[in-house]
Amino acid sequence: MSYLNVALGLIACVAISGCAKKSTDIAAQYVSPMQFQSYSCSQITEEAQRVSEYSARAMLVQNKTASSDAVATGVALVLFWPAAFFVSGNGANAAELARLKGQMDALQSASIQKDCGLEFRKAPLPEAT
């Protein structure tokens, strides 16, 4: 096995492991519904709308990051190994998105506990532009 093959293998491992996840692949972080226990149904609705808007923006950013990382990884593997250093991976946005998903789950639980009758639907993923 040549040094070039070993180097390419190592670069591939580093690049692939550092790639940002798509927003759908990020799990919700647990958030206790107890923090919304004192909220009225209308306050839960308002908070859910706010969290939903922030989540949509975070999902868009995360999906753009994942796409950029996929391109950089492809370039690194095929053409130019220093491109592997441009793979940004999961960072603050992924952590924020996980927290927001957890908040939405907690709001849904609080809504159910209070019998608010709210319908929580998964929104279609925002398109990357």
Image (tube, helix red, strand yellow):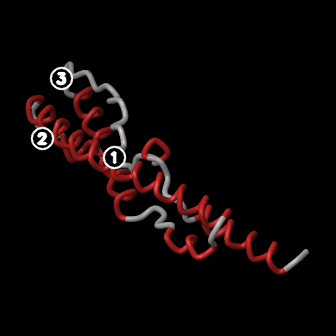
Residue 26: assigned label: none
* Horizontal relation, residue 121 to residue 44: left or right: right
The amino acid at mark 3 is Cys
| Residue lying furthest top | 117
Closer to the eye: label 1 or 2: 1
Local packing at callout 2 (Cα closer than 10 Å; few below 14, some 14-19, many 20+) is: few
Which of disc 1 and disc 3 is earlier in sequence? 1
Q: Please name the residue that numbered disc 2 is placed on.
A: 38
* Residue drawn at 67 percent across, 72 percent down: 11
**Mark 1 to mark 2: distance in Å?**
32 Å
SS of the residue at dot 3? loop
Give the Cα separation between the discs numbered 3 and 2: 13 Å
User: Is 79 located above or below residue 50 in the figure?
Assistant: below
Residue holding disc 3? 116
Q: Report the residue marked by disc 1.
A: 60
Q: Earlier in the sequence, mark 1 or mark 2?
A: 2
Label 2 sits on a secondary structure element that is: loop
Mark 1 nearby-residue class (10 Å; few <14, some 14–19, many ≥20): some
